[in-house]
Image: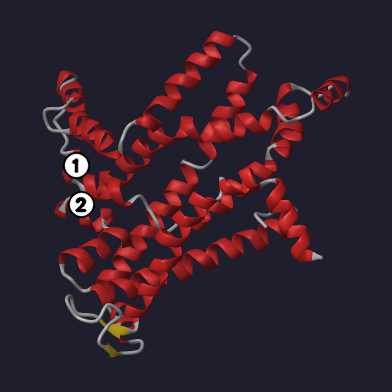
Amino acid sequence: MRRRTWRSALRRDWQLYSLAVLPLLFFVVFRYLPMAGNVIAFRRFRPGGDLFGDTWVGLRYFRMFWQDPTFWHVFTNTLVLGGLTLLFVFPLPIVLALLLNEVRTRWLKRFVQTVSYLPHFLSIVVVAGIVFQLLALDGVVNAGLRAVGADAVPFLQRPGWFRTIYISSEVWQTVGWGTILYLAALTTIDHELYEAARIDGASRWRQTWHVTLPGIRPTMVTLLILNVGTFLSVGFEKVLLLYNPLTFPTADVISTYLYRVGVVSGSFSYAAAIGLFESVIGLTLVLTANFVSKRTVGAGLW
């Protein structure tokens, strides 16, 4: 009966099922098949040799990065940068969506949405170029500092400024786009709840706190869990484009360290071990965040 039910459903809705073929192929080819390459984290791999390594070395490469002070330095940088990203980049789209939801002038609301969305469509290379142009010694920011009598600051060469620059550019590029899901979730809230709250004498702030935020809580929880899952995967491209040897103390993260170790130096097995460790940590964070979310707010990703 199950086979007949599945076949009848496939025969009836084959057009809908056909839409899933290409996404499934994408995930199989680019997500699941490459997982077989993780075996080189336990085998010695030499370029030009066996695709899955020549000899079994067990946990040798894991012990190497556990004893490597450079790895723990970049691991700490990744935690700090990922934590700052989660602290500032995640809540700001919620705040912007709530503010836009209160705007009653339609043209102003559309104008703010359009202006905030635009940076998302710029490539990371263009964003990095804009940052360089603004913060260079002869850039706009230092020109303004000279105009008020201050000395020029080499922002891009000072490690202490890198995290501020990265988080600021990330907020500018993603905050507008992140409001789309929250604005869509706001449209699903029953307006009768607001009417009941007004009858009970609730102010706009009380309506937001007791009606709006609970209404978009499932969306918030889902996106929070997804962001926690990518906690260690701090934007590789932007960091790679913005950092330099002078800012390594605060800018070097796991992904850029993997690039130098694996691609530049050719230590593919060592890089695979670090990447596997990072993936396990990410999976653990997702499962933990989902468990805590279900226990505290009653909603989770699954």
- In the image: residue 96, left or right of residue 158: right
Q: Nearer the viewer, residue 118 or 50?
A: 50
Task: Reply above or below: 232 against 61.
Answer: above
Q: Which mark is residue 247?
A: 2
Position of the N terminus, as image quadrant, is bottom right
Among all residues in the image, which is located at the extreme left? 138
Residue 236 appears in view:
yes
Q: Which mark is residue 156?
A: 1
- In the image: residue 137, left or right of residue 160: left
- Please identify the quarter of the rendering in which residue 201 is found: top right
Residue drawn at point x = 60 percent, y = 59 percent: 289
Circle 1 SS class: helix
**10 Å crowding of disc 2: few (<14), some (14-19), many (20+):** some
Residue drawn at point x = 68 percent, y = 29 percent: 186
Give percent across and percent down for residue 149: 15, 22
Sequence-wise first label, 1 or 2: 1
Give percent across and percent down for residue 147: 16, 18
Q: Nearer the viewer, residue 126 or 147?
A: 126
Q: Nearer the viewer, residue 268 or 280?
A: 268
Give percent across and percent down for residue 88: 47, 42
Question: How many numbered marks, from 0 up?
Answer: 2
Residue drawn at point x = 15 percent, y = 55 percent: 245
- In the image: residue 141, left or right of residue 109: left
Task: Reply above or below: 136 against 269.
Answer: above
Task: Reply above or below: 108 against 213.
Answer: above
Circle 2 SS class: helix
- In the image: residue 170, left or right of residue 68: right
Position of the C terminus, as image quadrant, is bottom right
**10 Å crowding of disc 1: few (<14), some (14-19), many (20+):** many
Task: Tell me which amino acid carries mark 2.
Answer: Thr
Residue drawn at point x = 73 percent, y = 39 percent: 214
Q: CA distance from mark 1 to mark 2?
A: 8 Å
